[in-house]
Amino acid sequence: MEDLLRADTVAGLDQFKTAFLSCGMRGVSHHVYNGVSEDNHLIDDPTVIQNLVDAANNGVNLYFSDWTYEFIERGWPDHVTWVGDESELDSAQRGQAGPVAARVVHDGLAAFMEIPVDSQIEVIFNQGGWAVPIEVDESLVDVLVRGDIVFDDPDSGEYKELTDVPLVFTFSAGGGQVVYTAFHNEAQITDDARDVLRFSLTQLSQI
């Protein structure tokens, strides 16, 4: 995947219908995310960012989770506002661990889950330090799930609450579709979160 992202053209990426960039893409290969070793080689590479944008424009669907928010921030900077200083890497990684009072706010997702719109669902963040989106440009982005969360303010260091944070959202990017989930699909996955992922992936497969 790293070779495809850093290639001189997007011919390799264009062979795929959907590319999945999970949280671990923030530090892949021999670059280990440990606070010491350099791991910005993908985020800081303009070729990688341009290839993602071009691939989406060409019809490739892109799924991002948690720390890979930086790719969205750099590729589509007008779509989402994140906690912290957007000029500083990793500054949005302020979400606190624990259950979140999340709600389904998208008609299609609600119908898929067979629940009314604005129904509460169970979402759990089993670790802190997840990237916190504050708001989206609703003329560009469709939000599927919102929630009330706790984060540590990067300026004061105090724990603060945010309501109606967009935890899952999607937007069109050229001929492709981008999906982002603030939560992972591993240890902390709940039945509700799994249904959200199933719906999101079903949407991607239909494009």
Image (cartoon, helix red, strand yellow):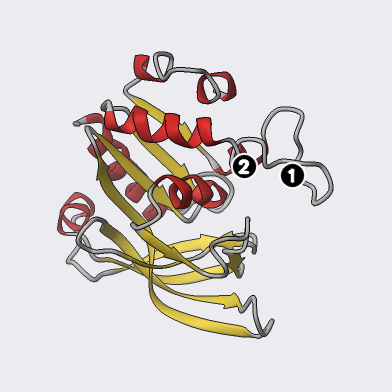
Image position of 81 with respect to 68: above or below: below
Mark 1 neighbour class, 10 Å CA radius: few under 14, some 14 to 19, many 20 or more: some
- Circle nearer the N terminus (2, 1): 2
Residue 49: image location, x then y, percent? 48, 37
Q: Residue at x 38, y 60 (%)?
A: 80
| Quadrant (top left/top right/bottom left/bottom right) for the C terminus | top left
Q: Which residue is mark 2?
A: 26
Image position of 106 with respect to 50: above or below: below
Image position of 2 with respect to 165: above or below: above
Mark 1 belongs to which amino acid?
Answer: Tyr
User: Do the CB atoms of the residues marked 2 and 1 lie less than 8 Å apart?
Assistant: yes
Residue 40: image location, x then y, percent? 67, 42
Which corner quadrant of the image does residue 143 belong to?
Answer: bottom left
Mark 2 belongs to which amino acid?
Answer: Arg
Name, please, the residue furthest toward the right: 36
Q: Residue at x 55, y 44 (%)?
A: 186
The kind of secondary structure element at disc 2 is helix
Mark 2 neighbour class, 10 Å CA radius: few under 14, some 14 to 19, many 20 or more: many
Q: Residue at x 16, y 52 (%)?
A: 108
| Quadrant (top left/top right/bottom left/bottom right) for the N terminus | top right
Q: Which residue is mark 1?
A: 33
The kind of secondary structure element at disc 1 is loop
Which corner quadrant of the image does residue 201 belong to?
Answer: top left
Q: Residue at x 58, y 35 (%)?
A: 45
Relative placement, left or right, of 82 versus 127 is: left
Label placed on residue 13: none
Of 22 and 186, nearer the camera is: 22
How many marks overall? 2
Residue 92: image location, x then y, percent? 57, 64
Give how far apart the Cα atoms at labels 2 and 1 are: 8 Å
Relative placement, left or right, of 114 versus 3 is: left
Image position of 104 with respect to 28: above or below: below
